[in-house]
């Protein structure tokens, strides 16, 4: 395979014999390329709003162009929007690196996902929360506890509900279904009746900064990191993520998480302790 590159590492053992190991460099190279692309993308995403802000400051400083109060107000609003975008992006970048740093320690607190979904809805930023669509929680299983990290679960569902509202139809409700996921898993699905996603995009959605329609995503206040964060939270919880979508019909994102057993012996004994 001409695309592969091998490194040969030779060590001499104490008895004089030699140990030869082959390391696949193409994998290392691919990981290094991904890291470099990520830094380049993140820098570009931060530099664009920064350039806008600097441009408006210069205009405001110029007595010929930054004169009247109305113009100043308009410019300040744009600067505020751009600065907010930068803050959201930095917050998402920090979340992602924190979740990744913790990836080897699966969180194991018993958490009820029903109040988590309420908190996720309450945490949505204003422009998304007022999109108009309602959120309906459908509970089809008795115990709704999982093993997890509460703050990260709120973030996971807040990102999914935000997407369902951003890319969904304003007059159709977003549904969150909680059901048995088979095995020791609880399945939580976030379902919208929005524009849907073409099949060729589905495998790439969880890549950092991958967007189907960049203009639309930015206009809706998206950082392009939402689903990357979702994927890493699910991975850290040893769960499963499955995104299904039909163009023109809608999108369903299924999250399977390890269930927690009942907290006290008085509750129902149907669920096995993971
Ligand atoms: P963003 O911040 O751009 O929303 P995400 O990582 O959350 O970034 O999502 C990546 C892209 O996937 C979005 O830009 C959008 O094109 C698409 N997408 C995500 N969720 C949905 C959805 N529910 N319906 C349609 N498209 C979606």
Image (cartoon, rainbow, N blue to C red):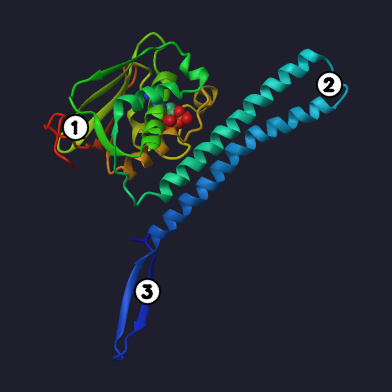
Residue found farthest to the bottom: 16
How far apart marks 2 and 1 lie (CA) works out to 61 Å
Whether residue 253 appears in this view of the structure is no
In the image, residue 110 sits, relative to residue 61, either above or below, namely below
Sequence-wise first label, 3 or 2: 3
How far apart marks 3 and 1 lie (CA) works out to 46 Å
The spot of residue 156 in percent (x, y) is: 38, 33
Residue behind mark 3? 8
Residue behind mark 2? 65
Q: Quadrant of the N terminus?
A: bottom left
Residue behind mark 1? 181
Report the image quarter containing ligand 1.
top left
Q: Secondary structure at mark 1?
A: loop
Q: Secondary structure at mark 2?
A: loop
Quadrant assignment, res 114: top left
Residue found farthest to the right: 63
């Amino acid at each position: 395979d001409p695309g592969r590159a091998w490194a040969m590492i030779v060590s001499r053992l104490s008895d004089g014999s030699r140990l030869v190991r082959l390391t696949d460099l193409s994998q290392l190279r691919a990981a290094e390329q991904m890291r470099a692309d990520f830094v380049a993308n993140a820098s570009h995403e931060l530099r664009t709003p920064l350039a806008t802000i600097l441009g408006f400051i210069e205009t405001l400083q110029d007595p010929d162009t930054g004169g009247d109060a109305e113009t100043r107000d308009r410019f300040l609003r744009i600067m505020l929007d751009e600065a907010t975008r930068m803050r959201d992006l930095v917050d998402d970048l920090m979340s992602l690196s924190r979740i990744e740093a913790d990836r080897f320690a699966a969180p194991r607190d018993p958490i009820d996902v029903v109040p988590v979904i309420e908190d996720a809805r309450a945490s949505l930023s204003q422009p998304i929360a007022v999109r108009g669509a309602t959120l309906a929680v459908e509970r089809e299983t008795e115990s709704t506890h999982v093993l997890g990290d509460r703050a990260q679960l709120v973030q996971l569902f807040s990102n999914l509900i935000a997407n369902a509202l951003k890319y969904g139809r304003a007059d159709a409700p977003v549904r969150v279904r909680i059901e048995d996921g088979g095995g020791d898993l609880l399945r939580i699905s976030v379902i919208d009746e929005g524009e849907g996603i073409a099949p060729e995009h589905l495998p790439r959605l969880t890549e950092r900064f991958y967007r189907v329609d960049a203009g639309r995503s930015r206009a809706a206040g998206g950082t392009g990191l939402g689903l990357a964060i979702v994927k890493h939270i699910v991975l850290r919880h040893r769960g499963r993520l499955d995104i299904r979508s039909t163009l023109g019909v809608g999108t369903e994102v299924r999250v399977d998480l390890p269930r927690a057993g009942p907290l006290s012996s008085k509750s129902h004994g149907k669920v096995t302790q993971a």
